[in-house]
């Protein structure tokens, strides 16, 4: 009996048969071998959703990357237009003129807030002018450009959470005068006091710099700049942790305009 059915009828029955088989199966009702319906919509549903999600995450990531690249490019243009004169090509800085902004230790320990607020407010009484007129977006583009130059992972969040210094300011003053005033100028007044280092005694720096930031800078220094480390045998001086705390405590008492 099955043999008397034409192949055409078999195909028709196969297509019309509503029975759902997942594997080639003999159907007693229609006397046909049913091959699993080639593509059942329910089997397609989950892979289709997964593919859709994957596709949308790929396109979103791509769009984010494009937006980030555009920001970095804008930041680079602003730096080349507004900052290069003092901070030099690639913002590598020049002693006595302006510090490096692309230095690897600086980028690794400086928080976004430290960098953007310094750009926004400038530093009163130093050569660093305020750039508030650029607005938040453009300042963030500068930040994106600087961050794109980072070679070390950022440690800023941890450093910002470090505890405040409990040093002795009197001892700190002695140390500061012995070791640092030669570079950062008397009272930490920086370039304007003939120093090759920045004005770390002025409010413009101190109000944005956390104790953790100052502590880490003293301990580690900044490679390829005159700011060397002040701890360890390779340091300019091998200060103890307590001495570093004393210096920070002293610095907090000097802010001058
Ligand atoms: C006229 C010179 C000049 C220009 C222009 C200038 N800066 Fe500065 N910048 C300085 C000086 C000088 C300092 C250090 C001030 C001090 O002694 O504390 C400084 C410090 C900084 C710091 C803090 C760095 C640190 O190590 O603490 C940042 C960030 C900075 N500048 C960003 C910028 C950006 C971004 C631009 C351009 C939009 C810019 N500066 C333009 C002179 C300049």
Image (cartoon, grey):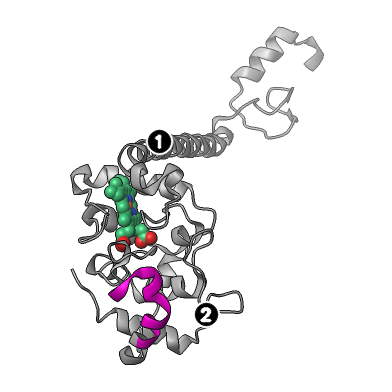
Q: Are marks 2 and 1 in contact (CB under 8 Å)?
A: no
Q: Nearer the viewer, residue 19 or 246?
A: 246
Any part of residue 107 in sight: yes
Q: Is residue 7 left or right of residue 137?
A: right
Residue underneath mark 1: 73
Residue 26, image x and y in percent? 75, 29
Residue 232, image x and y in percent? 58, 79
Q: Earlier in the sequence, mark 2 or mark 1?
A: 1
Q: Nearer the viewer, residue 58 or 139?
A: 139
Q: Residues within 10 Å of mark 1 (few under 14, many from 20)?
A: some
Residue 183 within the magenta-colored segment of the rendering: yes
Q: Residues within 10 Å of mark 2 (few under 14, many from 20)?
A: few
Residue 149, image x and y in percent? 48, 48
Residue underneath mark 2: 237
The secondary structure that most of the magenta stretch takes on is: helix
Q: Which mark is residue 235?
A: none
Any part of residue 1 in sight: no
Stretch in magenta: 174-187
């Amino acid at each position: 009996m099955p043999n008397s059915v034409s192949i055409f009828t078999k195909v028709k029955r196969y297509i019309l048969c509503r029975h759902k088989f997942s594997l080639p199966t003999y159907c007693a009702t229609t006397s046909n071998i049913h091959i699993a319906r080639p593509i059942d919509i329910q089997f397609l549903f989950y892979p289709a959703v997964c593919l859709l999600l994957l596709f949308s995450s790929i396109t979103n990531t791509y769009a984010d990357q494009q937006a980030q690249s555009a920001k970095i490019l804008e930041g680079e243009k602003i730096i080349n237009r507004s900052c290069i004169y003092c901070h030099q090509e690639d913002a590598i800085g020049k002693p006595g003129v302006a510090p490096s902004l692309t230095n690897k230790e600086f980028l690794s320990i400086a928080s976004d807030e430290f960098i953007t607020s310094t750009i926004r407010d400038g530093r009163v009484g130093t050569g660093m002018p305020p750039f508030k007129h650029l607005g938040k977006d453009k300042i963030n583009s500068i930040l994106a450009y600087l961050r794109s130059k980072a070679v070390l992972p950022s440690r800023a969040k941890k450093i910002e959470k470090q505890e405040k210094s409990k040093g002795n300011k009197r001892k700190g003053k002695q140390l500061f005068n012995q070791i640092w005033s030669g570079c950062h100028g008397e009272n930490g007044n920086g370039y304007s006091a003939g120093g090759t280092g920045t004005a770390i005694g002025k409010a413009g720096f101190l109000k944005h710099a956390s104790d953790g930031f100052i502590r880490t800078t003293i301990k580690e220094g900044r490679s390829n700049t005159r700011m060397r480390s002040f701890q360890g045998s390779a340091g300019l001086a091998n200060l103890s942790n307590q001495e570093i705390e004393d210096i920070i405590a002293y610095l907090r008492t000097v802010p001058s305009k």
